[in-house]
Amino acid sequence: MEGDQTESTVAIKGIERELICPACKELFTHPLILPCQHNVCHKCVKEILFAYEDSFADGGSESSNQSSPRIRISSPSTDRIDRISRSGSGIYSGRKRNSLTPRSSLFPCPGCQRDIDLGERGINGLFRNFTLETIVERYRQAARAAIAIMCNFCKPPPQESTKSCMDCNASYCNECFKIHHPWGTVKAQHEYGGPTTNFRPKILMCPEHEMERVNMYCEICRRPVCHLCKLGGCHANHRVTTMSTAYKTLKEKLSKDIDYLISKESQVKAHITQLDLLLKETECNSERAKEAASQSFEKLYHVLEEKKSAALRAIEASKNLRLEKLQTQAEEYQGLLENNGLVGYAQEVLKETDPSCFVQTAKQLHVRIQKATESLKSFRPAAETTFEDFVVDIAKQEEILGDLSFYSNEIPEINEAQSKIYNKAVISWECPGKADSADTYVLEYQKLNGEEESVMRKEIKVCSKSKIVSDLDDDSSYAFRVRGCKGSICSPWSREVVLRTPPAPVFSFLFDDKCGYNSEHLLLNPERTSVESMAGFPLLLGSERMQVGCYTTLDYIIGDTGIAKGKHFWAFRVEAYSYLVKVGVVSSNKIQKLFHNTHDVTSPRYEQDSGHDSGSEDAFFDSSQPFTLVTLGMKKFFIPTTPAAPKDPASRILPLPACLGICLDCDHGKLGFYDAGCMRCLYECEVDCSGIMYPAFALMGGAAVHLEEAITATYGEYNDDV
């Protein structure tokens, strides 16, 4: 017994985060299962619905039971509850604080943020998750192993309890349990277990019909229901199963899932090791990116510092030259003053009495004085004091630096759902982040040559987020990838997407509205690219004479263009609601036989359906039908019965592709049916191509066929920025 308790304690220690309420961040207390299958405490659901900010403060103090203190795993995350409450502030505005029922039952799930509508019953319509309560209680016991649960019936001092009775909702020591549950009495049959303070009801009752226990499982809503819910409640038309069957099925699935996870333990550990390496690699790469960005800016700083130093040196040199000139000019003017300099010298020269000596000296002195006199008449400084000629023009550089931005060059992703290949290829992609994360894109593609990839890669520069590619070879696989460019910086290449071209050139045609077209039963759109079958009034009027069996017939329609030679491919879509559609080809020399061999829909002698397997009538095309067709219907593709086909009918039924293609090889007399999405051949047969071959279609009941449109020059090309 001690060994089992130890194993249970060890096993339960690793599931703490599964037992924490996403709203209050504490162990669940009376958890309720929301329609999105997440669990939330009953108290937290009420708090969110009422949106009482002051009630959040009491969230951590409430306990699951007065005798068992609530174990706090972490501090309550009131911010999260506040955000949830604020998101529904418009719903609960004007609510009185002492109201007992919420104004609306719509609120966001704290686990997945999906809007949950509880309907008219509100919280009362939710199931309590008793299984989770039991697991939480086992966790509580493991967490507080040192705190004993005392017997409720011992005389003071009470003994430590060893059992808890689920029927009596009480705990007992061994002696008291024997006294209150004597052998041979009804109480001896009570359900009991280890000491606990969490007593749950033995029977799960229906929240819609409180007096009824749940005994069925609704497979549509995926929740337990009672028989009243199935008979006249909201689950009346739903598919249900017995609770024992659901229990067995879900238990097997859960056991398989657990076994699978356990078997993949080494793989999970390998992934964890890989993630640890990726974490370290991310840290290293981020440091490298920081260093690269710092180096880029340091280069700019270095260039600016050099330009700054050159400009300052030029200004300093000009300043020194100007100061020198101005200083010389100042000294010259200082010499003009009396008793100083030039004037004093001239006065001394005037004292010379010798004419020859006077003339020799006075001539040069006269020139100097005359020059000084002229400078006095028009004074002009020898140098400018302003440095307006030393201007650093940074307008252009400032504009360039303004455009300088550091951004995350996100990798575009090719949208496989919007990308397709038909007569041409249209490749669409999108960016996970901002729409303007790239100015241009580069689309690269290459043809895959068998097992070896071709070295020929073609690149196309694109300004939008879609591109049409022409001149692709038939029956070939191409790998496409794209990257975004902003300025001179390009993102890494996206993940490659491989698409396969049709096995033959695309054959274009429209539905023929003249040859054999029954306007009472078939409806064509104005473009003649779509046909829909309608029962019409003749069938309704003829139904008065119908007593037994089904007396409906197929309505045929062919293409308006025939094929005489070569290999051709065309594709179309069949609506999912279509009951019966036959597709294939018909020869020109059999068209008259086809349309003149019709049956009266009201005649009880005509019986189209033999009652056998739907594909058995396709076994002998040449003998029973004047054309080659394959049956489609009810979202299924039926492979005709042939010697090479599987004998089991279920093996000949395939899911109907979203787009079906037909390849006619007149030269070799072969007709193939393809999944046009991946160009995979579903079925191939021989066909007599002695005459001109026309695409043929037959519809019965509610059905519709749409021809695949050719990719034109503007097909799918768009720009999200527009």
Image (cartoon, rainbow, N blue to C red):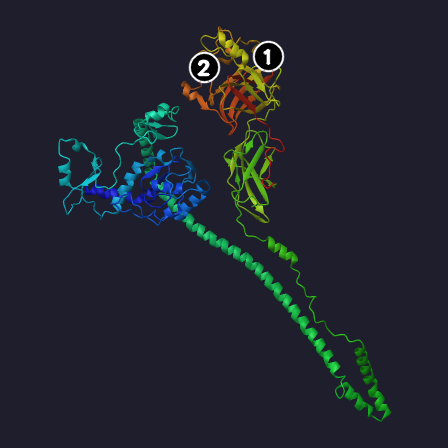
Sequence-earlier tag: 1 or 2: 1
Tell me the crowding category of disc 2: few under 14, some 14 to 19, or many 20 or more residues within 10 angstroms, Cα based.
Answer: some
Residue at image position (30%, 36%) is 130
Residue at image position (81%, 83%) is 369
* Residue 616, numbered circle: 2
Q: Is residue 48 above or below residue 207?
A: below
Q: State left or right for residue 555 relative to residue 259.
A: right
Would you say residue 214 is visible in this rendering?
yes
* Residue 609, numbered circle: none
Would you say residue 668 is visible in this rendering?
no
Residue closer to the observer: 499 or 560 = 560
Q: Is residue 679 above or below residue 485?
A: above
- List the single residue furthest toward the top: 605
| Image location of residue 541, percent across then percent down | 52, 10
Q: Quadrant of residue 322?
A: bottom right
Residue at image position (59%, 11%) is 592
| Image location of residue 277, percent across then percent down | 41, 48
Residue closer to the observer: 42 or 670 = 42
Q: Quadrant of residue 21?
A: top left
Disc 1 target residue = 589
Q: Are marks 1 and 2 in contact (CB under 8 Å)?
A: no
Tell me the crowding category of disc 1: few under 14, some 14 to 19, or many 20 or more residues within 10 angstroms, Cα based.
Answer: few
Q: Nearer the viewer, mark 1 or mark 2?
A: 2
Residue type, numbered disc 1: Asn
Q: State left or right for residue 197 relative to residue 544.
A: left
Residue type, numbered disc 2: Ser
Q: State left or right for residue 52 relative to residue 484.
A: left
Q: Quadrant of residue 176?
A: top left
Residue closer to the observer: 518 or 284 = 518
